[in-house]
Each structure stands twice: as structure tokens, then as C-alpha cells.
Image: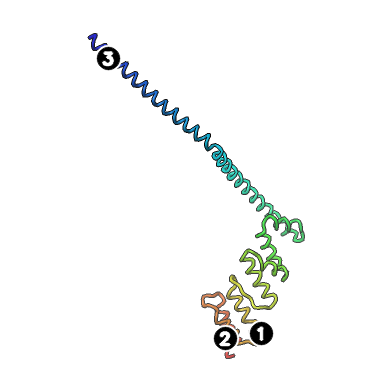
Amino acid sequence: MGFLKLRRNKLSITETINEAKKELSNDEHMLASAFKVEKLYKKHKFKLFAVLGAAVLYFGGTAIMNNIAEQKIVAGNEALITLQKDAKDTEALEKLKSNNPALFELYSYQNAMKNSDTAALKTLSASKNDIIADMSSYHLAVLEGKPAKSELYTGVAQIDNAYLLIKDGKISEAKEELNTIAEDSPVYNISKMIKHYTIKGK
């Protein structure tokens, strides 16, 4: 009995020592990992700070830019409301132009059409906004009685051009112009009527 007890005590001590060794080994691994992390941190800390700084600047900058853009939209809308009440308010006009150039061009186009302002339409026909440029150059040509080209008003422009040719007595050319209007065009039936009643047999 005494021998068994002694053996059990010996096993218990051995197990305790083994457990202690395992714990020490784990602690050593943790310390080694911590030293590696510290070494990497010291080696790359400036890069890390640069990345973190860039991230802060990016997200902070994006938030600021979004806020500025939102304020510009609000300021532009307020200026437009003011101009609708008083079209001669030059301060509101400048405010609209600086805060929302696209809305400013649209407002200018509407005014130019309302007042048949060819000078304004000429300026707007050079716009970087393709839609504003197309509409302005088309209406400018109509007001000046010149042949027009338009992506937005293709068929209508062809009718206008045919009318100008008829006025100049160029009947065959007018007919050719009308013949280029596609059957699925909204103005196809108008072109047929013009050919039938205006240049029939000519």
C-alpha cells in the first residue's frame, strides 16, 4: 500500500512538472510572438501611421466633401427660388452659377427661349452639357432661320430644314430631306403631308 501511494505521489509530481513545462512553453511562445509584433511595429510604425493617417484623411475628406456638395445644392436651390420671384436679382444669379452650374445653364436656357435671346443661346450652344448644347444650337438655328442639326430634335430639325428649302424654291432638295425621315419618327406623318400637299408633283 505504501509503495502504491508513493508511486501515485510520484506520478502526481511528474504530471505537475509536465503541466508546468507546458505552461512555460506557452508563455515562451506568447513572449516570442509579442517580441515579433513589437519588432514589426518598430520596423513599420511610420508606414502604419501613414496608412492610418491616409484612412482618416480619406474618410474625413469624403464626409467634408459630401457636406460641401449638399450645402451647394441647398444654396443653388435657394438662389433659383429667389430668381423665380425676381429675375433681376444679380446676386442670386451669381449664387446659382457658382453653386450649381448645371442648374444655372438650364435656367439661362429657359430665359433665352422665353426672350428669344440669340446671344445667350449662342453661348449655351458651346456648353459642356450635351443636352443644353444640343437644345440651344437647335433653337438658335430656328430663330436665325438657318438649317439645324439636333440629336434630340432630329425629325423636327429635318422638317424645319425642308421648310427652309421650300422657301428658297429648292423643291427636290426639300423632298430628299423629307425622304430621310424614318417611318418610326414622330414627325413621319407630317413629312408625308408636306410632300403630298406642298411639293406634290414638283
Q: In which quadrant will I find the C terminus?
A: bottom right
Of residues 8 and 99, the one drawn nearer to the viewer in this rendering: 8
CA gap between label 2 and label 3 equals: 120 Å
| Residue 19 left/right relative to 69 | left
Identify residue type, mark 3. Arg
- Classify mark 1: helix, strand or loop: helix
- Position above or below: 155 against 93: below
Q: Which residue is mark 2?
A: 196
- Classify mark 2: helix, strand or loop: helix
Mark 3 vs 1: CB contact within 8 A: no
Q: Earlier in the sequence, mark 3 or mark 1?
A: 3
The dot on residue 8 is 3
Image point 39% across, 25% down: which residue? Answer: 25
Q: Position of residue 98 (x, y in %)?
A: 70, 56
Image point 59% across, 70% down: which residue? Answer: 152
Q: Position of residue 190 (x, y in %)?
A: 58, 79
Q: Quadrant of residue 84?
A: bottom right
Q: In which quadrant will I find the N terminus?
A: top left
How many neighbours does mark 1 have within 10 angstroms: few (below 14), some (14-19), or many (20 or more)? few
Q: Earlier in the sequence, mark 1 or mark 2?
A: 1
Q: Quadrant of residue 26?
A: top left
Identify residue type, mark 2. His
Q: Which residue is mark 1?
A: 167
How many neighbours does mark 3 have within 10 angstroms: few (below 14), some (14-19), or many (20 or more)? few
Of residues 134 and 16, the one drawn nearer to the viewer in this rendering: 16
CA gap between label 1 and label 2 equals: 16 Å
Q: How many marks?
A: 3
Of residues 133 and 6, the one drawn nearer to the viewer in this rendering: 6
Mark 1 vs 2: CB contact within 8 A: no
Q: Position of residue 74 (x, y in %)?
A: 67, 52
How many neighbours does mark 2 have within 10 angstroms: few (below 14), some (14-19), or many (20 or more)? few
